[in-house]
């Protein structure tokens, strides 16, 4: 676990650096998007098909982008990986390269707009790409990924949660396989926050409590943080197209700015909380799991706590839950080797080794998440950061918003940030 010390920005910081309006426009361009409805199952906007848990979507396979044939030998490489910065342990890549007798090249990106722009050019090709779940429909519709041949992926069915071997956003794992799961919850320090957040009926209202003034932060991320405003309103419709609910979310966040002087940060959960610069922050479960390793000498990391609001004993509100994924770009030069790599990353030992560095949890069927505490991957006072398969039935999953709805969210977010 020593490798966690001294790390720079973690992978999810760069989601917050994306720039919402630019990304929305870019994704729309990728897929030829037009207007369309939000919500409902199997929503289709132009050729983009957005599934829901109640109505999963199976993405079509086109004649000009077929899966590779079965029974092929892996190419000689090098395997070219394109991933978020600091979101895979290089040691795991070296292990794979040694096992297959190939070289590897790891290229990183800082936001999805940058990544998709590079993937859509013919100047360079990659063999592995790591999209976020909610963007997979547009990435597939844009022709960026190739369909998978499951003959090369026996570990998918053998090792991964059934819910994510057949995800609603990519039924049958036609184009992607899961990488890591996470929740969005609340992190705080017990030596700075006296409020009994765990017992609140709506724990998200802690971000409006004047008692937490000047020590509170929210992520600088329009989808996640506007969703917190929705939860503050007593709703769980984090994919809403209702202008009145979007307005109410905006007003809740503006109220938090006025009453609490809330800070919008990119590193508050895993840097400023363990450093005791902040006492309360909106937090991804993986960020809080890693936070103790960023605590400076003399600051007690055992004061850190995490709550996913749906699991609060008195809570009536919700919380985000989702996953990131892996896929193979349509112009990959080593597609057979890439399939072997996906299967390798779905192996229990490789997934756990990688987890020990990134601390974003792999969805393994034969892994009791509580064992991660017993094996000292996760500190016992942060065992609430563990993610269980049933959490996906309890929490809310972000969906790809149609551009007109996304634009409403982005406009409201701009007003929030302007105060």
Image: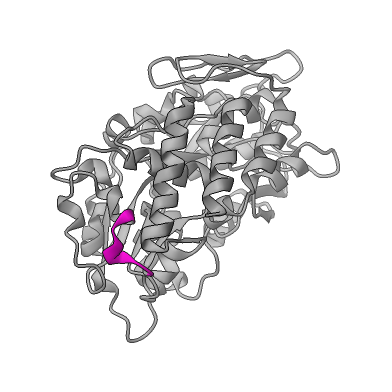
Residue at image coords 41%, 33%: 238
| First to last magenta residue range | 208-214
Placement of 5 over or under 347, stated as above or below: below
User: Residue 350 in the image: x percent, y percent?
Assistant: 45, 50
Q: Residue at x 55, y 31 (%)?
A: 176
Q: Residue furthest right?
A: 123
Task: Report the residue at 70% width, 25% height from top.
Answer: 31
| Relative horizontal placement of residue 394, taking residue 107 as reference (left or right) | left
Residue 64 locus on image (x, y percent): 76, 17
Q: Residue 294 or 342: which is nearer the viewer?
A: 294
Q: Is residue 234 magenta?
A: no
Q: Position of residue 150 (x, y in %)?
A: 53, 25
Q: How many marks?
A: 0
Give the left or right position of residue 19, taking residue 178 as reference: right
Q: Is residue 211 magenta?
A: yes
Q: Foreground: 394 or 413?
A: 413
What x and y, as percent, mark residue 306? 27, 57
Residue reaching furthest bottom? Answer: 298
To which quarter of the image does residue 418 belong? bottom right
């Amino acid at each position: 676990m020593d490798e966690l010390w001294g790390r720079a920005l973690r992978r999810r910081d760069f989601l917050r650096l994306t720039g919402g309006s630019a990304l929305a426009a870019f994704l729309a361009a990728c897929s030829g998007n037009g207007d369309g409805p939000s919500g409902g199952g199997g929503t289709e906007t132009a050729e983009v098909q957005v599934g829901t848990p109640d109505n999963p979507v199976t993405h079509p396979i086109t004649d000009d982008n077929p899966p590779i044939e079965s029974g092929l030998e892996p190419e000689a490489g090098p395997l070219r990986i394109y991933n978020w910065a600091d979101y895979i342990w290089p040691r795991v890549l070296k292990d794979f390269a040694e096992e297959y007798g190939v070289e590897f090249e790891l290229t990183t990106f800082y936001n999805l707009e940058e990544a998709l722009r590079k993937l859509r050019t013919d100047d360079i090709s990659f063999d592995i790409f790591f999209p976020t779940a909610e963007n997979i429909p547009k990435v597939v519709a844009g022709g960026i990924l190739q369909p998978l041949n499951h003959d090369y992926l026996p570990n998918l069915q053998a090792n991964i949660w059934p819910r994510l071997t057949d995800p609603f956003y990519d039924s049958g794992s036609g184009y992607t396989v899961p990488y890591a799961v996470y929740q969005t919850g609340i992190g705080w320090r017990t030596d700075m926050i006296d409020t009994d957040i765990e017992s609140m009926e709506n724990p998200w209202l802690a971000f409006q409590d004047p008692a937490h003034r000047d020590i509170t932060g929210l992520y600088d991320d329009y989808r996640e943080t506007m969703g917190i405003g929705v939860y503050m309103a007593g709703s769980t419709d984090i994919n809403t197209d209702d202008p009145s609910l979007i307005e109410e979310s905006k007003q809740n966040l503006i109220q938090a700015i006025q009453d609490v002087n809330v800070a919008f940060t990119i590193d508050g959960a895993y840097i400023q909380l363990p450093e005791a610069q902040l006492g309360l922050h909106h937090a991804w479960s993986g960020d809080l799991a890693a936070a103790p390793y960023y605590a400076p000498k003399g600051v007690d990391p055992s004061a850190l706590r995490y709550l996913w609001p749906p699991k609060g004993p008195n809570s009536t509100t919700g919380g985000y839950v989702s996953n990131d994924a892996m896929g193979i770009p349509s112009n990959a030069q080593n597609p057979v080797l890439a399939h072997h790599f996906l299967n390798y990353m779905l192996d229990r030992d490789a997934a756990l080794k990688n987890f020990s560095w990134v601390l974003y949890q792999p969805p393994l069927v034969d892994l009791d998440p509580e064992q991660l505490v017993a094996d000292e991957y996760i500190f016992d006072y942060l065992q609430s950061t563990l993610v269980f398969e049933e959490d996906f039935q309890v929490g809310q999953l972000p969906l790809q918003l149609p551009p007109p709805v996304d634009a409403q969210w982005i406009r409201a977010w701009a007003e929030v940030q302007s105060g």
